[in-house]
Amino acid sequence: MKHLKENSFENDGLPKILPPKKDIVFKAIFGDERNIDVLREFLEAVIGKRIKNLRLLDPINKQRSEDDKLSILDVKAELANGELVNIEMQARNTPDLRSRISYYSGRSLVDQMGVGDDYSKLKPVISINVLEKTLFKKSKKCHNIFSMFEEDERFRFNDLQIIHVLDLSRINLEKNETLSDWLSFINSEEEEDFVMVAQKNKAINTAFDYLKIMSADKEQRMLYEARLKMQRDAQSFENAARQEGERKGRREGRIEGKIEGKIEGKIEGKIEGMQEMLAFLKSGRSLEEAQKKFLSREKV
């Protein structure tokens, strides 16, 4: 394997070894043609079947019109049998993450079709999502696999969409030792942790060698730092927008409360006044007396 150009390591405040669980590092390892065998063995551990060969594809899903939503994956590959694999590393579980995963999987199906193409030619899409935080609180597993089944009788609708979700916070629950080792490598931050897992698996050791050289490359470290800054800025913007929304909601809530209170007060007052008037009339008083009594009260 050809390595990136190695530069002297500088104390720039960044980790000595860049963490693979950051998307830009994850993509550099698994999305590099020079590491195709590393990617193949990782996929075999996730999918659970032998992969003879595969090729990397452009991770940018094509836009069919100017208004079409642009979608960019971390890694996209095609297996020898034509099956497509979408791979993403997610550090944050946004509220729309499940919808995003479904959308990207669906786009990979749609993009296979051209005008006049036969639906029978569609190839399955395997979506692999590595998450730093737990997405499914109700699950007790590290590796969740989703596909479409009949709700009661549990037979499969088809095999066109399979979704794998890998939870880095639950590695200790993974029973597949090889997959557990890969996830431990991705989740590692300290050099001794990388060394420990790399000693157990030849492909992981290759990935670690690549990671060490990449981590010592000045340009790669600058890219990593720029990516961190962009993520921090995006997080700050989201936090500021949320806080402003909460403040605005509280202000609007107070205003609405005052308005509703005044309206409700007036309505309740009129209802009470009408009830008093009816009671006054039932006591034998005339309508003229009632009008004088209650109209004079409203003027006060």
Image: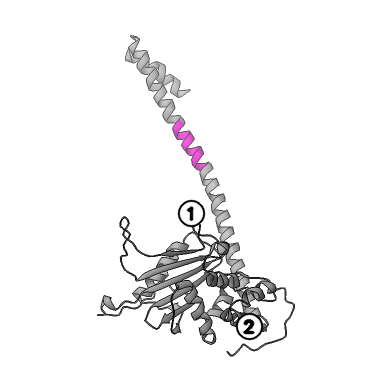
Which tag, 2 or 1, sits closer to the chain's start? 1
Asked if residue 298 shows in the view, the reply is yes
- In the rendered structure, which segment of residues is drawn in magenta? 255-264
- Rendered residue at 50%/55% (across/down): 137
Which residue type carries mark 1?
Lys
Q: Contact, CB < 8 Å: mark 2 with mark 1?
A: no
Residue 281 marker: none
- Disc 1 crowd, CA 10 A, few/some/many (<14, 14-19, 20+): few
> Label 2 to label 1, Cα distance in Å?
37 Å
262 drawn magenta = yes
The quarter of the displayed image where residue 196 is located = bottom right
Q: Estimate the x, y position of residue 26 in percent, counting from the top left.
A: 56, 75
Residue at the spot 45% in from the left edge and 73% down from the top edge: 48
Q: Name the residue under label 2.
A: 209
Query: In what element is the residue under mark 2?
Result: helix
Q: Residue at x 58, y 78 (%)?
A: 201
- For label 1, the residue is 138
Q: Quick check: 80 above or below 162?
A: below
Q: Magenta segment, principal secondary structure?
A: helix
Q: Specify the quadrant that holds the N terminus.
A: bottom right
Quarter occupied by residue 290: top left
